[in-house]
Image: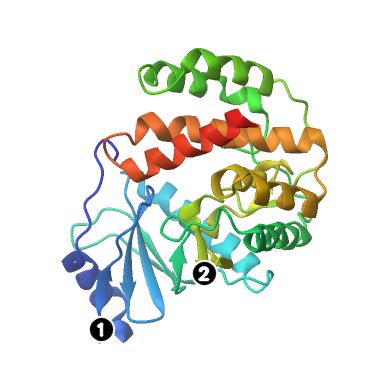
Amino acid sequence: MHAGQLMVTPETVRALVDEQFPEWRGLPVESVAGQGTVNAIFRVGDRLAARFPLQPGDVEATRRGLRAEARAAGELAGRTRFRTPEPVALGEPGAGYPLPWSVQTWLPGVVATDDDPGESVAFAHDLAALIHDLRAVGTRGRTFTGSGRGGDLRAHDEWMETCFGHSAGLLDVPRLRRLWARLRTLPRGGADVMNHGDLIPGNVLVSGGRLAGVLDVGGFGPADPALDLVSAWHLLEAGPRKAFRDELGCDDLEWERGRAWAFQQAMGLVWYYAESNPAMSRMGRRTLERVVAG
């Protein structure tokens, strides 16, 4: 999916686990099939998941990033009514794999990519409850760091130009440019709140049309109050989306900024993963269709 992407095999994981965590030598190692784009995931026994960054990088920078993710996951653990992974350990390079890696608790369930809850009003209420719980943790005076989504929409103009340039023939680019020209100017409203930061179908576990758990919580932190509203367009059809908005009590500005963040994220998915991860590309296309429809 990425230039220079690192390859991780079960044999490599087995060697790393046996060498660095001998207490887990007797546990089976199994590759987890999925549509994730950041980490290769391996199940270790029944209760653990090992995560290996896919993109090459600096060892110390990767280690700092993984420690930050572990702190975020630890801060969130037990603070919502829905299950989230908890940090367990940090592994080091070895056995031909060049970067640090992490271990966290395994959450059973089916991701929303495979069991679509988009028509479920009950799921929409669960999603709103999750966002209430995330915000209730409190920022403790922290603010958005300025990296990635969650700050100034206009800071993403260059990336959006890249996306528009690569999307000719895939999407109605002139129409999407006009929409972005309006959405990018929406003023910021309200102080930062705590956000998950990436509420896409692959990070949400469902059971019986209800929210069962949330994955990839290492980005939990302060950001635009509208950021986690991306979930409304990534995960919900029109009726449940309205129920979600009503439950959260979003005003027009916050709602439109959430739409803008969903648009910004989805634009990058369609073209970037068109060949390497078609399911992710299709997800982006569906989100854009919902965003354009309003």
Name the amino acid type tagged 2.
Pro
Residue 25 numbered mark, or none? 1
Observer-nearest of 233 and 266: 233
- Whether 249 is drawn above or below 262: the answer is below
Check disc 1 and report its element: helix, strand or loop: loop
Asked whether, in this view, residue 185 is left or right of residue 115, the answer is right
**Residue 189 seen in the current view:** no
**Residue 66 seen in the current view:** yes
Q: Position of residue 138 (x, y in %)?
A: 78, 58
- Whether 42 is drawn above or below 225: the answer is below
Observer-nearest of 272 and 27: 272
Tell me whether the residue at label 1 lies in contact with that at label 2, contact meaning CB atoms closer than 8 angstroms: no
Q: What's the residue at 38%, 70% (across, down)?
A: 49
- Whether 99 is drawn above or below 152: the answer is below
Observer-nearest of 230 and 75: 230
From mark 1 to mark 2, how far is it between C-alphas? 22 Å
Q: Position of residue 117 (x, y in %)?
A: 54, 58
Q: What's the residue at 37%, 20% (across, down)?
A: 166
**Mark with earlier residue (1, 2):** 1
Q: What's the residue at 67%, 34% (across, down)?
A: 151
Asked whether, in this view, residue 120 is left or right of residue 20, the answer is right
Which quadrant of the rendered structure holds the N terminus?
Answer: top left
- Residue ID for mark 2: 85
Q: Position of residue 256 (x, y in %)?
A: 72, 33
Residue 146 numbered mark, or none? none
Number of the front mark, 1 or 2: 2
Residue 71: name its quadrant: bottom right
Q: What's the residue at 60%, 48% (across, down)?
A: 231
Which quadrant of the rendered structure holds the C terminus?
Answer: top right
Name the amino acid type tagged 1.
Arg
